[in-house]
Amino acid sequence: MLGLVSLFMDLSSELIHALLPIFLVTTMGMSMSALGVLEGAAEATAMIVRIFSGPVSDWLGRRKPLLLLGYGLAALSKPLFPLAATPAVVVAARLIDRSGNGIRSAPT
């Protein structure tokens, strides 16, 4: 079951993230350099959260709560992308999504 959830979550993420640069640059008016900073910050967020979620998972001795939190954050961020009226909302949604990815990746 976890494999299917992971498949569909990754599929939805890839569908959104493939179109996100075009949306941000053409529709929202974000510069290419700002887009690069956003993508770098998003990946850094995922990696930094991973560093901490692994030890938290070991300390708790339970993986399921962190998996649920990670998938929940990622799922909650998805509707923010099409509803975004400003680049700040997209940035927040992207960072929330990558935080969820970092939380769920370390314990699995």
Image (spheres, rainbow, N blue to C red):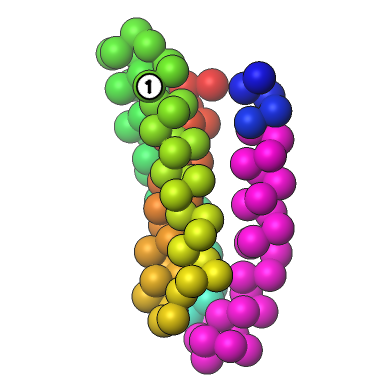
* Number of disc labels: 1
Rendering coords of residue 65 (x, y %)? 38, 22
State which quarter of the image contains the N terminus: top right
Q: Using the rendered image of the protein, determine whether residue 68 is visible from the camera's viewpoint.
A: yes
The residue sitting at 38% across, 64% down in the picture is 92
Image quadrant assignment for residue 26? bottom right
**Is residue 18 located in the magenta-colored stretch of the structure?**
yes
The residue sitting at 63% across, 31% down in the picture is 5
Rendering coords of residue 12 (x, y %)? 66, 50
The residue sitting at 49% across, 46% down in the picture is 74
In the shown orientation, is residue 45 left or right of residue 75? left
Identify the residue at the far top of this view. 61
The residue sitting at 52% across, 31% down in the picture is 105
**Is residue 91 located in the magenta-colored stretch of the structure?**
no
Q: Nearer the viewer, residue 56 or 84?
A: 84
Q: Nearer the viewer, residue 97 or 1?
A: 1
Element type where label 1 sits in the image: helix
Rendering coords of residue 51 (x, y %)? 38, 33
- Taken as a whole, is the magenta stretch helix, strand or loop? helix
In the shown orientation, is residue 57 left or right of residue 104? left
**Residue under pointer 1:** 65
Q: Which residues are magenta?
A: 6-33
